[in-house]
């Protein structure tokens, strides 16, 4: 298919653009296969370059001979285009709708994008499983790197290389995979250096109504236990949902077959419930006419903060089992690709200081989301404004980022990255010129697209994403999940509704103060060295 077939009117002059907190711009609107572009051809006027894949929905209105197109974006921005001529407006709207809903992954912009910057570090090679395994090998010799999934026949959503207990061979892994949902056999997620405990993740066991058993599965997860130790299975479903799953061939680990493991159910919502929650939250944030009571009522009705609390509580539980009780943990829900990943990744943020650095957080996202098979293409196909009925869409990754922001806000000096980094990841998960979040091992992304990490890890970008308050903290950090401690993430949900000018100025002033403090500290250190040198050179100075 040619993009030209979908573009009925490629160019319109005299279009007026309205954007939040920016002056109105009149210029020429152009449609390409991947972008909506508006240029005024005037100096000092910022152009609009909007990816079609970032468009969630559009609305058309007509006032006389002028048509208005309201463009609602997946990053929650809303812009308006005033287009002269009814036919031109209808053609532009029709083209935008067609180009923003293309289903073919191979037609997406990352496969056409060519970087305008020098790739200093290839992001596709930055976080390979074999490199992560070298770090594991430096701490323990009880694990091995298996190629059992090198052709993706054992599990289509796992990477080709996986870390498994050294005592478990590949034939055993294949049998365990046939007993777990989607072939997602228990896999190492995190090794706690302090006490040697581990966190694993998996799909639900396929016990069914007959109580099917798999001794190889029992052997695999028992291989991670220390002698005389117990483990915890954290199931991210209610006991009722887990029971109902048996009727569909799923289930959970029975204590009779897994006597060394205690099962805990911690309910985390999924799919439609989460998508509806996001829609309600954005709707509440977008309406500026609310009274205080109405605003608080709509915020509560969205249940967004409740979901944040549920996820953080479960992550804290997993971290507590590992660090304070000295027990290994297995986390799963149904598929093991959504709430499971929220819990395992947040538990690592709590436990592991390395995950709070910029590179460490990139590695975490790569390991626990991209290589762990989270279906970004399905979950992020729609945002909060889409008029289509939700299918598999859900803001699972956005909820994870919100949880990280909550912890960052409570421990502002313990993270090397700032809020801008989290917002950037949210934006690129929904629409991007990079191939990172297309998320399939079979697409040969490293050969055909550019990695987001290649762009992020350039010095000029890292400077914008670094937290000026950061001081390395080697301790475990325990976030509060009390309702009073969890706030609305204004940097995402209110950034297009009110100006950030005052906050930006305050941030710049803070950075200035920190830099000035460093200069003064350097002067103090220099004067101390000079004084010490003088005292060495002239012993009389030391005489009382």
Image: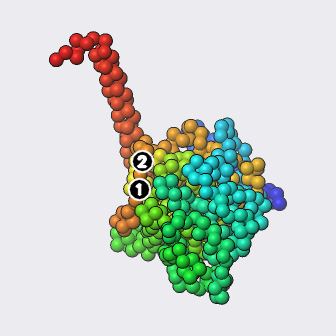
Q: Which mark is residue 121?
A: none
| Callout 1 touching callout 2 (CB < 8 Å) | yes
Q: Using the image, determine if residue 55 lies above or below residue 512.
A: below
**Helix or strand or loop: what does disc 1 sit on?**
loop
For residue 157, side relative to residue 61 (left or right) = right
How many marks do you count on the picture? 2
Q: Label 2, on which residue? A: 473
Q: Residue furthest front?
A: 227
Provide residue 455's location: percent of width, then percent of height. Answer: 62, 44
Q: Taking the image as drawn, is residue 314 in sight?
A: yes
Provide residue 426's location: percent of width, then percent of height. Answer: 56, 57
Nearer to the camera, 259 or 351: 259
For image coordinates 38% across by 56% down, the residue present is 410
Q: Taking the image as drawn, is residue 103 in sight?
A: no
Nearer to the camera, 29 or 343: 343
Q: Residue furthest right?
A: 1
Q: Using the image, determine if residue 129 lies above or below residue 231.
A: above
Provide residue 524's location: percent of width, then percent of height. Answer: 32, 26
For image coordinates 81% across by 60% down, the residue present is 5
**Helix or strand or loop: what does disc 2 sit on?**
loop
For image coordinates 31% across by 12% down, the residue present is 537
Q: Label 1, on which residue? A: 477
**Distance from Cα at disc 1 to Cα at disc 2:** 9 Å
Q: Please identify the quarter of the rendering in which residue 189 is found.
A: bottom right
Provide residue 470's location: percent of width, then percent of height. Answer: 42, 44
């Amino acid at each position: 298919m040619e993009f030209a077939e979908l573009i009925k009117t490629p160019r319109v002059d005299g279009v007026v653009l309205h954007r939040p907190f920016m002056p109105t711009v009149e210029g020429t609107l152009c449609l390409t296969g991947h972008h909506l572009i508006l240029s005024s051809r005037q100096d000092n006027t910022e152009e609009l370059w909007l990816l079609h894949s970032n468009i969630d929905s559009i609305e058309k209105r007509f006032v006389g001979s002028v048509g208005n197109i309201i463009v609602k974006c997946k990053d929650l921005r809303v812009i308006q285009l005033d287009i002269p001529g009814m036919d031109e407006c209808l053609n532009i709207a029709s083209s935008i709708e067609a180009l923003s809903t293309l289903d073919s992954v191979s037609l997406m912009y990352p496969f056409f994008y060519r970087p305008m910057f020098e790739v200093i570090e290839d992001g596709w090679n930055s976080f390979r499983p074999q490199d992560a395994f070298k770090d594991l090998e430096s701490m323990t010799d009880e694990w091995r790197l298996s190629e059992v999934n090198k052709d993706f026949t054992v599990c289509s959503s796992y990477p080709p290389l996986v870390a498994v207990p050294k005592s478990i061979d590949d034939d055993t892994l294949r049998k365990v995979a046939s007993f777990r949902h989607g072939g997602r056999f228990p896999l190492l997620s995190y090794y706690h250096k302090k006490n040697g405990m581990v966190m694993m993740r998996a799909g639900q066991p396929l016990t069914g109504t007959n109580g099917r058993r798999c001794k190889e599965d029992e052997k695999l997860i028992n291989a991670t236990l220390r002698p005389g130790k117990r483990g915890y299975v954290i199931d991210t479903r209610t006991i009722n949902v887990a029971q109902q799953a048996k009727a569909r061939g799923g289930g959970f680990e029975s204590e009779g077959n897994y006597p060394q493991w205690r099962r805990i159910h911690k309910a985390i919502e999924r799919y439609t419930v989460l998508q509806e929650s996001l829609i309600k939250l954005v709707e509440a944030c977008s309406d500026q006419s609310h009274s205080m009571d109405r605003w608080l009522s709509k915020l509560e009705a969205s249940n967004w903060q409740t979901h944040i609390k549920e996820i953080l509580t479960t992550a804290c539980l997993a971290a507590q089992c590992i660090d304070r009780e000295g027990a290994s943990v297995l986390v799963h829900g149904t598929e093991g690709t959504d709430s499971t990943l929220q819990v395992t990744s947040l538990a690592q943020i709590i436990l592991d200081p390395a995950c709070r650095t910029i590179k460490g957080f990139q590695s975490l996202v790569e390991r626990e989301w991209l290589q762990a098979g989270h279906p970004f293409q399905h979950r992020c196909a729609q945002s909060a404004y889409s008029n289509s009925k939700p299918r598999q869409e859900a803001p699972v990754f956005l909820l994870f980022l919100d949880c990280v922001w909550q912890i960052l806000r409570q421990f502002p000096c313990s993270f090397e990255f700032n809020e801008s980094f989290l917002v950037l990841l949210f934006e690129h998960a929904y629409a991007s010129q990079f191939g990172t979040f297309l998320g399939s091992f079979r697409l040969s992304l490293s050969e055909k697209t550019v990695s987001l990490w290649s762009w992020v890890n350039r010095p000029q970008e890292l400077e914008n994403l670094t937290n000026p308050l950061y001081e390395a903290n080697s301790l475990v950090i325990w976030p509060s999940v009390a309702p009073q401690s969890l706030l609305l993430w204004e940097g995402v949900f209110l950034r297009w509704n009110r100006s950030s000018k005052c906050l930006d100025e305050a941030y710049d002033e803070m950075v200035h103060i920190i830099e000035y403090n460093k200069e003064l500290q350097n002067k103090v250190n220099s004067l101390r060295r000079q004084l010490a040198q003088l005292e060495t050179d002239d012993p009389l100075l030391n005489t009382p």
